[in-house]
Image (cartoon, rainbow, N blue to C red):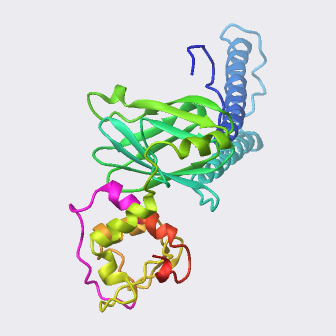
Amino acid sequence: MNGGFYLLPPSASDAAARYDILMLAEFLLTGFVALAVAFLIVYFSVRYRRDSGADRSAAPVRGRRLEIAWTVIPLLLFLCAFAWAAYDYAQLHRERPDATPVFVVAKQWMWKLEHTNGRREIDELHLPLGQPVRLVMTSQDVIHSFYVPAFRIKQDVVPGRYTTISFTPTEAGEFHLFCAEYCGTEHAAMRGRVVVMRPDQFAAWLQQGNASEGMAARGFELYRRYGCSGCHEAQSSVHAPDLHGLLGRTVHLQDGRTLVADEAYVRDSVLLPKKDVVAGYEPIMPSFAGQIGEEDLLAIIEYLRSTGGGDARTGH
């Protein structure tokens, strides 16, 4: 990070490269259209000015082909640009099985981040170079927006929801992190930095500090403390769904719908248990709204992720 002037910030992620090409293409397209329209306006204004000698005797009264051409061609061009942008946007949110999750909780006025091994950060995010990352984000109070200009990523962080974004850092170094949503009187102070390191340096950094307890291990303790194990383990007398290997599994619901279990589904199942009742089970689970914090929820989700797929009841 330095104070130099740039038309664009450094391009430091795979998303940045895609969006830079898209922006250049749209700039050229809209610039060409604007110049063409401006040229025609000036040309016709001069050619057919009031006292000019232009021949107006055979002025065309209809030009259907021309009208269709100037309507359809720009429409197709801009639809192509829209489709291109939609594809790039979808790439930020698609599931990457090899992406490493990092959990982000925003609050007035800080970013709290936690890696899967339990290493925590405030207003800083360390990432490995060249390895895909998936941020799972939520807010503890108001709407925030996670914005890293060098990565060309900006994602709203909303209370009561999990939002995700995936990307791969492509340049080592330090980059600005901002909140792009006005979130209160000290909004401007809610900023930090993203540090991209070589994989070996990142691995060494990850083992330092408060990495004694991983998120999955803490999540397992919370899973037991909040009583989840009392209903969802094999030896339980309560008829409750098996949660082991839940993340990524297709779930059939009582109302006939199906969905793929993700972080948001687990969160809703804990706080709004009657929203998506699993087929074959009674809606007897009580809501934990107001009893469990976002950070504890993320830890439990990471524990469930650690149980992998299939039947893993004996994993712990």
In the displayed structure, 108 sits above or below 302; it is above
Residue 37 at least partly seen: yes
- Does 136 appear in magenta? no
Compared across the picture, whether 141 is left or right of 192 comes to left
x, y percent for residue 172: 66, 33
Q: Nearer the viewer, residue 87 or 304?
A: 304
x, y percent for residue 7: 63, 19
In the displayed structure, 255 sits above or below 72; it is below
User: Residue at point 63% right, 62% down?
Assistant: 97
Residue range in magenta is 280-300
Q: Nearer the viewer, residue 98 or 41?
A: 98
Q: Nearer the viewer, residue 186 or 2?
A: 2
Quadrant into which the N terminus falls: top right
In the displayed structure, 168 sits above or below 192; it is below
Compared across the picture, whether 5 is left or right of 80 comes to left
Quadrant into which the C terminus falls: bottom left
- Does 281 appear in magenta? yes
Compared across the picture, whether 131 is left or right of 182 comes to right
In the displayed structure, 277 sits above or below 198; it is below
x, y percent for residue 107: 32, 42
Q: Which of the 4 quarters of the picture holds residue 232?
A: bottom left
User: Residue at point 51% right, 80% down?
Assistant: 312
User: Residue at point 35% right, 67% down?
Assistant: 221
